[in-house]
Each structure stands twice: as structure tokens, then as C-alpha cells.
Amino acid sequence: MLNAGQALMLVRCNLQHLGLAYIVIAGFGIAAFAWPPVALGAVAMALAVLVADGIARPGSSLFYPTIRHGSRGDRRVALTFDDGPDPDTTPAVLAALAETEAKATFFVIGKALAAQPDLARRIVAAGHALGNHSWRHSRWQNLRGTRSHLQEIDRCDQAVEKIAGAERPILYRPPVGLKCGGLARAAWRRNVKIVAWSLHSRDTRLADPQSIARRVLSRVRGGDIILLHDGHDLPGRRRPHCAEAVRLIARGLRERGFECVTVPELLAGGR
């Protein structure tokens, strides 16, 4: 969660967007309607709120088209995992997925992937998909410019490429789900698909597998992209509750008539 200081810094990083939009709207308002100063102030406030929302809300498409879910008429959902692979947690998650015949998508941190290539191969061999979650997963990545975003995307792409094959991955989930103008320019250059989520398991706050599962199963809808974490972006930390939560979630989804597929399968529509 962003504090007020971080939010202000992120807004400042995108002042070029806010300023350009304000000039265009204010100029039109003055020329066409002779807007008074109070109206111009209201426009500035509204634009500031819009930009802040575009930065901080993972599902916003203000800066770049962002995928949040598949077809709502589908009885399929996509389990997705961030911040791995983790040498302890990810194997347990793979076992839980195998037990329940569920497929998933792992948005990996490039550095963690490079450190666990055999584990990454196990993910692919089991029929799961790999996605790009940046090379380092810096929580301050959104304060950096286009060049830094390109480097983060490219380095993780290259790490995944060695595992999954010659075709570079097209699915990208930015660290903490944040977006800005620099990321948008990098994403356009690389023609990536940014994937957020429609259902957060809150497993970063909840440590009880049953509580995590109840939250997901009580809210799930067809086409949902569900966010979980098999790894941690901070060194030395683990998500030991993840595997059991996955087992409970996958079983509950099956009982409710849902099928767990990869994000590419979900977005492709029918079989």
C-alpha cells in the first residue's frame, strides 16, 4: 500500500501527462465557455485524482491497456502466482496443483528464476505458464524512467526465454501492479500484454490457508484472474501458507464447477 509521500512522488513522475491534459482541457474551456478560475481548479483536481488512480490501481488502463479478467461467461479461472520461484514454497505449490489437476501461471522475478532454473523447468514441464514480473522487483521501479523499465522487462524475458523456448513471453505484471508513463512507453516498445488481476487472495496479509481460501471462494466469478504469491520479493522471507491455500482453493473451485487454466488459455477463449 502506498503512503502519501510515495503517492505524491508517483504523481510527480507523471506530471507531463497531467500538464498536457490540463492545458488542452483548460484551453478549450476558456475559449468555448469562458470558464472561471474555480472551474479550472476543479479540472486540475479531477485530473490529479485520475492520474493518481491510474498509477496506484493495478487494473487501471489509463497509461496502458491492462487485462484484469477473461470472459465473464466462462466457467474457467486463472490462478496466478507472483514473486517466485521459491525453492521451498514453489515445489509444494506444484504438488498441490498436480493433486487437483489445476493449471496456473507463474509471474516470476527474473533473478529468482535465474537462481532456480531446474525449478522453472519443472513449472513448464507440468503444463503451467511463465510470465514476466520484472528482473529485480524493486518496489521503487515505478519512479524510474523508460530505459530502466525496458531493462527490467528485457532481462526477465531473456531468463524466461532460456526455460520456455525461443519466443519471448508477452505477459507482464509490473512490480506491485503499479504503472506510470515510463512503463507505458517501455510496454509499447516491446508490445507486451500487461496482466493484472480481478481477485486478490490477500495472501500477503493473511497467513491462514483457510482464511485465504474462504476469501477467494466467496468472491470468485467466471473469468477471474486470481492473485496469489508463491515467493517473496524480500530476501529470506517465505510464503509457507501458499501451498495449502492453493489446495483448498483448487478443490473448492472444482466443486463449484470451475476449471483452473493458464492465463494464455483463459484469454484465448474456447478450447
Image (spheres, helix red, strand yellow):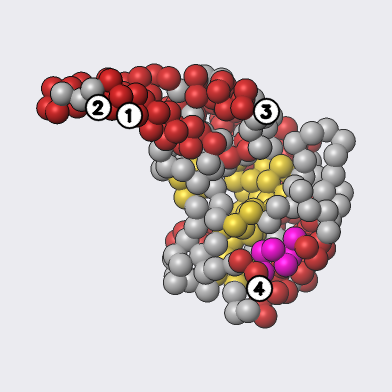
Circles 1 and 2: CB atoms closer than 8 Å: yes
In terms of sequence position, does the residue under pointer 3 or pointer 2 come before the other? 2
Amino acid carrying label 3: it is Ser
Mark number for residue 43?
Answer: 1
Circles 2 and 4: CB atoms closer than 8 Å: no
The magenta stretch spans residue 252: no
| Residue that label 4 marks | 253
Circles 3 and 2: CB atoms closer than 8 Å: no
Please tell me how crowded label 1 is: few (under 14), some (14-19), or many (20+) other residues with Cα within 10 Å.
some
Amino acid carrying label 1: it is Val
Q: Which residue corresponds to the image point at 60% horizontal and 72% vertical from the top-left?
A: 259
| Residue that label 3 marks | 138
Percent x, y of residue 82: 68, 46
Label 4's element? helix
In terms of sequence position, does the residue under pointer 2 or pointer 4 come before the other? 2
Label 3's element? loop
Q: Which residue corresponds to the image point at 60% horizontal and 46% vertical from the top-left?
A: 131
Percent x, y of residue 153: 56, 31
Amino acid carrying label 2: it is Ile
Q: Is residue 264 left or right of residue 65?
A: right
* Front one among 251 and 84: 251
* Front one among 151 and 117: 151
| Residue that label 2 marks | 25
In terms of sequence position, does the residue under pointer 1 or pointer 3 come before the other? 1
Q: Mark 1, mark 3: which one is toward the viewer?
A: 1
Give the residues drawn in magenta, as a range.
Answer: 212-217
Amino acid carrying label 4: it is Leu
In terms of sequence position, does the residue under pointer 1 or pointer 2 come before the other? 2
Report which quarter residue 50 is drawn in: top left
Mark number for residue 206?
Answer: none
Label 2's element? helix
